[in-house]
Image (cartoon, rainbow, N blue to C red):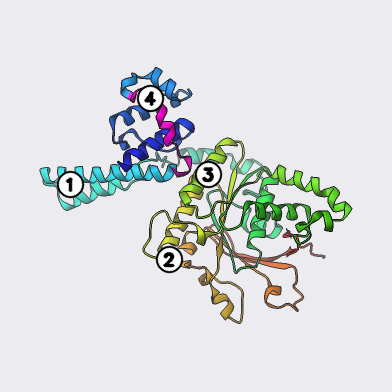
């Protein structure tokens, strides 16, 4: 019953979001009922021809009785749920796999299969049936022939807005899962906002999932960063702003508007819900490359009840890496560090300080640590400086550098060294 309701939701969502018909990777065989198989097959037929898919076009294309009739198709819209599309898709595919296993075991018994034959058949079921993968290198190699003779952009990824970070990472790269980790009050959220604002102003599509902080708070921080405003004074700008700051207010808002940042501040989101929202936003702006930001990893909700918190975080980490590959865009995720940092003489973070570090360290393509000396030593000469340490980079060097960080405005900026 649950599987059939999930099927209805999938089909209803596809009626609202036609791009999912061919992009979701669903197959006719995954559906349990013949009517649903017929509906999906007809949807695919219309989508491949570039035609609109709705209950009227379905009725015109196929015998109404084969697709349940007008009322049945119209009612599918009530089951639509784009946010949980991926979750329901997994339910339907898992149900199909269970039935396939039962069928294979029956066939194995009738035909006296060996254990090796049974295991081989079961392994084939674990293949991701939703994807058609091109494995030949032929087209990739053809695309490489003229590479040495074509001028390349200096930066291959999305700029971070920080000179030294761009030098080490060559910008945020497509399909990479990037962790930015620190202890509380080190400036993680301000760093994320800086990256999002920079990416947006350079023509990309920043999508922020703020699971802890409200949309209003994030927006205020972004305005403060864009305009260089004191966050303390922003509590009452009419009273505390200078006339110049009031005059420049519209300029700051226009800059933020140009950055085209999207914020989802729902708490307790699962990775599947994050994917569904990001997919919907990206679909509405197909000309822009998305970059996804999540604040923060440890409060993402697991898809299923795991044995313990470490296992749950491990699954979430793996899902985020998969999402980066699926969307072919950078996924930048904030992460908390354990209290072990505070117990050492040297407070600079290390890999083992990552909470539930095993899976995160393994899955992440890039791991960045943030550190402020003035957090621990109020008398230091390093006030308003933020150290960023690239502790892991799967496809490049590691290294550390320092940027200017204004705790008052939340702004990050390059340090201009004198020679």
Mark whose residue sits in front, 2 or 4: 4
Q: CA distance from mark 2 to mark 4?
A: 47 Å
- Residue at 48% from the left image edge and 43% from the top image edge: 83
Q: CA distance from mark 1 to mark 2?
A: 35 Å
- For this view, does 397 lie left or right of residue 298? right
- Residue at 36% from the left image edge and 19% from the top image edge: 62
Q: Position of residue 274 (x, y in %)?
A: 51, 48
The image's mark for residue 71 is 4
Numbered disc total: 4
Q: Position of residue 54 (x, y in %)?
A: 45, 25
Mark whose residue sits in front, 4 or 1: 4
Does residue 18 appear in the picture of this structure? no
Mark toward the start of the polypeptide (4 vs 1): 4
In the rendered image, the residue lying farthest to the bottom is: 345
- Residue at 28% from the left image edge and 46% from the top image edge: 124
Mark toward the start of the polypeptide (3 vs 1): 1
The image's mark for residue 105 is 1
Mark toward the start of the polypeptide (1 vs 2): 1
Write down the residue under mark 3: 277
Mark whose residue sits in front, 3 or 4: 4
Quadrant containing the N terminus in the rendered view: top left
Write down the residue under mark 2: 310
Q: Are marks 4 and 1 in contact (CB under 8 Å)?
A: no
- Crowding around mark 4 (Cα neighbors within 10 Å: few <14, some 14 to 19, many 20+) is few
Within the image, what quadrant is residue 278 found in? top right
Q: As rendered, which of 290 and 233 lies closer to the eye?
A: 233
């Amino acid at each position: 019953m649950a599987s059939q309701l999930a099927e209805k939701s999938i089909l209803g969502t596809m009626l609202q979001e036609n791009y999912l018909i061919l992009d979701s990777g669903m197959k006719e065989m995954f559906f349990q009922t013949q009517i649903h198989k017929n509906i999906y097959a007809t949807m695919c037929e219309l989508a491949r021809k570039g035609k609109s898919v709705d209950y009227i076009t379905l009725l015109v294309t196929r015998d109404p009785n084969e697709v349940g009739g007008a009322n049945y198709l119209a009612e599918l819209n009530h089951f639509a749920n784009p946010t949980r599309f991926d979750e329901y898709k997994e339910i339907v595919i898992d149900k199909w796999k269970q039935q396939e296993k039962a069928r294979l075991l029956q066939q194995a018994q009738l035909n006296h299969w060996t254990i090796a034959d049974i295991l081989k058949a079961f392994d084939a079921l674990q293949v991701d049936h939703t994807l058609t993968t091109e494995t030949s290198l032929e087209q990739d190699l053809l695309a490489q022939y003229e590479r040495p003779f074509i001028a390349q952009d200096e930066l291959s990824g999305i700029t971070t807005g920080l000179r030294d970070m761009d030098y080490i990472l060559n910008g945020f790269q497509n399909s990479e899962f990037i962790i930015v980790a620190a202890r509380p009050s080190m400036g993680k959220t301000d760093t994320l906002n800086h990256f999002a604002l920079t990416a947006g102003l350079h023509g990309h599509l920043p999508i922020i999932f703020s699971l802890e902080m409200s949309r209003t708070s994030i927006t205020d921080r972004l305005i403060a960063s864009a305009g260089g405003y004191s966050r303390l004074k922003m509590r009452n700008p009419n009273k505390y702003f200078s006339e110049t700051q009031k005059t420049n207010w519209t300029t700051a808002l226009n800059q933020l508007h140009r950055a085209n940042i999207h914020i989802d501040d729902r708490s307790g989101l699962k990775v599947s819900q994050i994917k569904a929202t990001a997919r919907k936003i990206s679909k509405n702006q197909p000309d822009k490359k998305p970059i996804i930001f999540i604040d923060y990893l440890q409060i993402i909700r697991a898809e299923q009840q795991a044995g313990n918190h470490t296992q749950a975080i491990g699954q979430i980490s793996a899902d985020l890496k998969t999402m980066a590959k699926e969307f072919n865009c950078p996924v930048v995720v904030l992460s908390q560090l354990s209290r072990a940092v505070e117990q050492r003489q040297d407070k600079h973070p290390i890999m083992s300080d990552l909470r539930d570090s095993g899976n995160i360290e393994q899955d992440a393509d890039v791991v960045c640590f943030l550190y402020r000396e003035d957090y621990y030593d109020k008398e230091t000469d390093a006030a308003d400086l933020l150290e960023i340490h690239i502790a892991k980079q799967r496809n490049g060097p590691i290294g550390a550098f320092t940027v200017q960080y204004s705790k008052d405005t939340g702004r990050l900026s390059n340090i201009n060294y004198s020679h």
